């Protein structure tokens, strides 16, 4: 069937009987492609006017102290909202790119301890005023085979969520451990936790347990969808366990063949 997508499955019953099912999924694939193209194009078109708006706002804010207080307040709010829109557009662009890539080719050796230390340091710098204690625990030195930018983005998303959904001054731990089953990066917080009924839906686009809380903290609702796709690119998955009122553990699980011994040089840079 040239130019058509056909899903084929076979069920084998006893006595050599077989059921062969063929389903033409071309239309579904085409609609999905149209959705992805639309989101990518719309996000791209929004990027330029947003950049211009931000530029003007920043120039006006430079004269902030000469403006009447009501104007200063309005401009401050406009600046925050423009920043939110910019975060949203950027996340949408990242997500559509990730969704479009079926075969992912970047395979570099990423030193796990260096990666986690560097993410923890960025998070400490960014959340200074909230006094979180962010610690890294490495059970055994190792490297991961994968895309350094994507791995950084996945773990950073989890760490910023941990900061956002836990009280000031609380403890956040980034941990690496290995077993015969594979390699695991977990991000543990002592925050608000998540009721079990929400857990299966957390990685859906725009799914939020508490929409007002998420927007208040600058969330786009796309972070965990991005994490899911990055882990799929690495043949891994996300595991979530949580107790409301006590905290959560988000674990990036990687298959054993992605875990390598540590050798130099390594790549952890997000550039
Ligand atoms: P958002 O930008 O809203 O944080 P995410 O996709 O990153 O979007 O997360 C989806 C939802 O999952 C969040 O809105 C929040 O309700 C919940 N969530 C994510 N991480 C945590 C966490 N560490 N503790 C409690 N809730 C969390």
Image (spheres, rainbow, N blue to C red):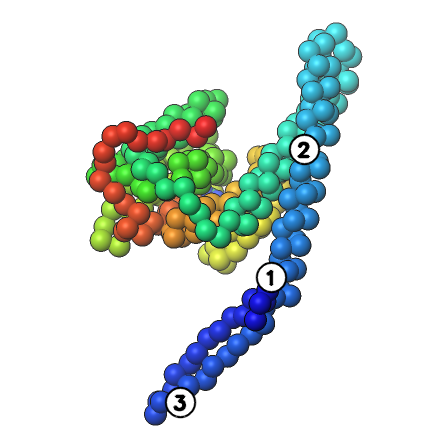
Question: Which numbered disc, 2 or 1, marks the residue that appears first in the sequence?
Answer: 1
Mark 2: C-beta under 8 Å from nearest atom of ligand 1:
no
Image spot of residue 74 (x, y percent): 75, 23
Spatial CA distance of label 2 from label 1 is: 27 Å
Query: Label 2 crowding class (10 Å Cα cut-off): few <14, some 14-19, many 20+?
Result: some
Residue that sits furthest to the bottom in the current view: 15
Residue corresponding to mark 2: 47
Left or right of residue 68: residue 131: left
Question: Which numbered disc, 3 or 2, marks the residue that appears first in the sequence?
Answer: 3
For label 1, the SS is helix
Labels 3, 2: front one: 3
Question: Which numbered disc, 1 or 3, marks the residue that appears first in the sequence?
Answer: 3
Q: Residue at x 23, y 50 (%)?
A: 179
Residue 238 seen in this snapshot = no
Q: Which of 141 and 186 is in front in this view?
A: 141
Q: Nearer the viewer, residue 180 or 160?
A: 180
Labels 2, 1: front one: 1
Q: Which residue is drawn at 46% across and 75% down?
A: 9
Residue corresponding to mark 3: 17
Q: Residue at x 42, y 26 (%)?
A: 122
Spatial CA distance of label 3 from label 2 is: 57 Å
For label 3, the SS is loop
The answer to the question of whether label 3 and label 2 lie on touching residues, with beta carbons closer than 8 A, is no
Mark 3: C-beta under 8 Å from nearest atom of ligand 1:
no
Query: Label 1 crowding class (10 Å Cα cut-off): few <14, some 14-19, many 20+?
Result: few
Residue corresponding to mark 1: 29
Image spot of residue 81 (x, y percent): 68, 30
Q: Residue at x 65, y 49 (%)?
A: 37
For label 2, the SS is helix
Above or below 110: residue 229 = below
Above or below 140: residue 63 = above
The label number, if any, that marks residue 10 in the structure image: none
């Amino acid at each position: 069937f040239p130019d058509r997508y056909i899903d084929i499955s076979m069920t084998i019953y006893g006595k050599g009987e077989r059921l062969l099912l063929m389903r033409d999924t071309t239309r579904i694939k085409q609609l999905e492609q149209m959705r992805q193209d639309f989101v990518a194009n719309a996000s791209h078109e929004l990027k330029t006017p947003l950049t211009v708006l931000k530029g003007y706002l920043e120039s006006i804010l430079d004269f902030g102290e000469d403006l009447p207080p009501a104007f200063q307040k309005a401009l401050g709010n406009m600046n925050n909202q423009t920043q939110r829109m910019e975060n949203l557009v950027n996340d949408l662009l990242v997500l559509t790119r990730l969704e479009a890539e079926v075969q992912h080719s970047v395979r570099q050796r990423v030193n796990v301890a260096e990666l986690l230390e560097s993410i923890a340091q960025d998070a400490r710098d960014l959340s200074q005023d909230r006094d979180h204690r962010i610690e890294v625990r490495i059970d055994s030195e190792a490297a991961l085979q994968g895309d350094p930018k994507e791995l950084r983005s996945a773990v950073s998303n989890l760490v910023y969520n941990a900061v956002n959904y836990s009280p000031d001054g609380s403890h956040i731990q980034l941990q690496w451990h290995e077993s015969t089953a594979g390699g695991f990066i977990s991000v543990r917080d002592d925050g608000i936790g998540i009721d079990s009924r929400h857990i299966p839906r957390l990685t859906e686009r725009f799914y939020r347990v508490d929409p007002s809380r998420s927007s208040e903290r600058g969330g786009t609702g796309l972070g965990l969808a991005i994490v899911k796709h990055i882990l799929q690119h690495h043949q891994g998955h996300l595991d979530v366990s949580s107790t409301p009122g006590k905290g959560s553990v988000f674990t990036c699980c990687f298959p054993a063949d992605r875990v390598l011994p540590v050798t130099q040089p390594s790549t952890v840079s997000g550039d």
